[in-house]
């Protein structure tokens, strides 16, 4: 499968050193919304969507406090739908969207692909969409799925995958795409594993925020660490899954490339020297 790495939303909070770990505390940091566009046997599939066109047209729906703190660039050219078109495809070619979770900077673009099936963990749907589980106030932007998309749900269990459990998101026809529960940041948070030509790619979503967190000697910038802690729904479980990812990298780093949603270092590493296509 050919895998394209896309940044679908640049965010520029103040305090570069405290967020990115380098630079001045007075300069603005850079964070990304790292998504994947995967060419499958059943059309195109997106892993997360970042910020969408409707978010850019109406920034307050993202939450005034979130916009003020994260300072998103809100550039229409960065949206997944514009980048899909720039690669020569139609939005209708996107048949599937696999979401790590339904936070505003991950699900904002699903309305730009109204014909796509949305794959998400059942507990995430029950909290964000059906409200069967109480969500923290203001956590989700429900307008992002007001078009009533076609949902597909996943739970626990599945195939063994390097010590994790993964469910084949597109069935047996595409066994190289797995939804892997990694709860903690949200209760239904998942990683998405995609098998490329040379190795697996694991999009770990917000299971960790900074590349240094899964190194042998973990490190984390101060402000980013505080933000991550505030965003955790279950901090102990998120930390346990982060430790599992650290062990996965140590034992199978030659077989699995692990990256998160917002770290520009992870994103640039995956872009392979400036190309949008890593395969």
Image (cartoon, rainbow, N blue to C red):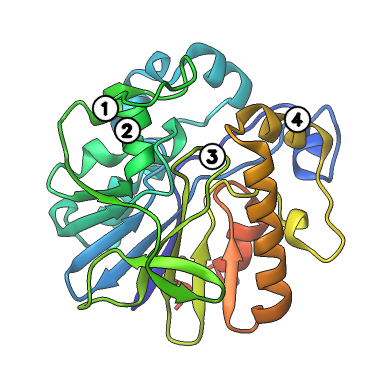
Judged by depth in the image, the label closer to the viewer, 3 or 1, is 1
Which tag, 3 or 2, sits closer to the chain's start?
Answer: 3
The CA distance from mark 4 to mark 1 is: 30 Å
Label 3: element kind: loop
Label 4: element kind: helix
Q: Residues within 10 Å of mark 1 (few under 14, many from 20)?
A: few
Which tag, 4 or 1, sits closer to the chain's start?
Answer: 1
Q: Quadrant of residue 230?
A: top right
Judged by depth in the image, the label closer to the viewer, 4 or 1, is 1
Which tag, 3 or 4, sits closer to the chain's start?
Answer: 3
Question: Residue 117: x and y, percent?
Answer: 18, 50
The CA distance from mark 3 to mark 1 is: 30 Å
Residue 115 seen by the camera:
yes
Residue under circle 2?
Answer: 126
Residue under circle 3?
Answer: 10
Specify the quadrant that holds the N terminus.
bottom left
Look at the numbered discs 2 and 1 and tell me whether their residues touch, using CB distance below 8 Å.
Answer: yes
Q: Nearer the viewer, residue 37 or 119?
A: 119
In this view, the residue farthest toward the front is 157
Left or right: residue 155 compared with residue 278:
left
Judged by depth in the image, the label closer to the viewer, 2 or 4, is 2
The CA distance from mark 2 to mark 1 is: 5 Å
Q: Quadrant of residue 168?
A: bottom left
Label 2: element kind: helix
Q: Residues within 10 Å of mark 3 (few under 14, many from 20)?
A: many
Q: Nearer the viewer, residue 8 or 125?
A: 125
Which tag, 2 or 4, sits closer to the chain's start?
Answer: 2
Label 1: element kind: loop
Q: Which mark is residue 226?
A: 4
Residue under circle 1?
Answer: 130
Question: Which residue is pictured at 59% across the width and 49% down the height?
Answer: 207
């Amino acid at each position: 499968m050919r895998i394209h790495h896309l940044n679908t939303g640049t965010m520029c909070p103040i305090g570069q050193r405290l967020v990115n770990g380098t630079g001045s505390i007075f300069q603005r940091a850079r964070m990304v919304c790292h998504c994947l566009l995967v060419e499958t046997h059943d059309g195109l599939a997106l892993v997360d969507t970042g910020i969408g066109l409707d978010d850019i047209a109406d920034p307050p729906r993202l939450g005034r406090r979130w916009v003020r703190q994260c300072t998103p660039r809100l550039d229409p050219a960065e949206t997944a739908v514009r980048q899909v078109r720039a690669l020569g495809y139609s939005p209708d070619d996107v048949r599937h969207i696999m979401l790590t979770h339904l936070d505003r900077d991950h699900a904002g673009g699903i309305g730009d692909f109204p014909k796509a099936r949305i794959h998400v963990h059942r507990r995430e749907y029950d909290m964000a969409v059906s409200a069967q589980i109480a969500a923290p106030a203001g956590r989700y932007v429900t307008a992002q799925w007001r078009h009533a998309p076609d949902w597909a749900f996943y739970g626990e269990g599945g195939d063994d995958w390097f010590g994790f459990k993964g469910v084949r998101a597109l069935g047996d026809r595409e066994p190289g795409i797995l939804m892997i529960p990694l709860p903690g940041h949200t209760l239904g948070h998942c990683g998405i594993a995609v098998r490329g030509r040379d190795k697996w790619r694991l999009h770990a979503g917000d299971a960790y925020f900074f590349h240094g967190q899964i190194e042998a000697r973990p490190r984390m910038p101060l402000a980013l660490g505080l933000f991550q802690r505030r965003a955790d729904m279950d901090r102990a479980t998120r930390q346990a899954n982060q430790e599992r990812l650290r062990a996965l990298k140590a034992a199978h780093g030659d077989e699995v490339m692990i990256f998160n949603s917002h770290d520009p270092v992870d994103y640039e590493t995956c872009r392979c020297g400036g190309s949008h296509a890593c395969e």
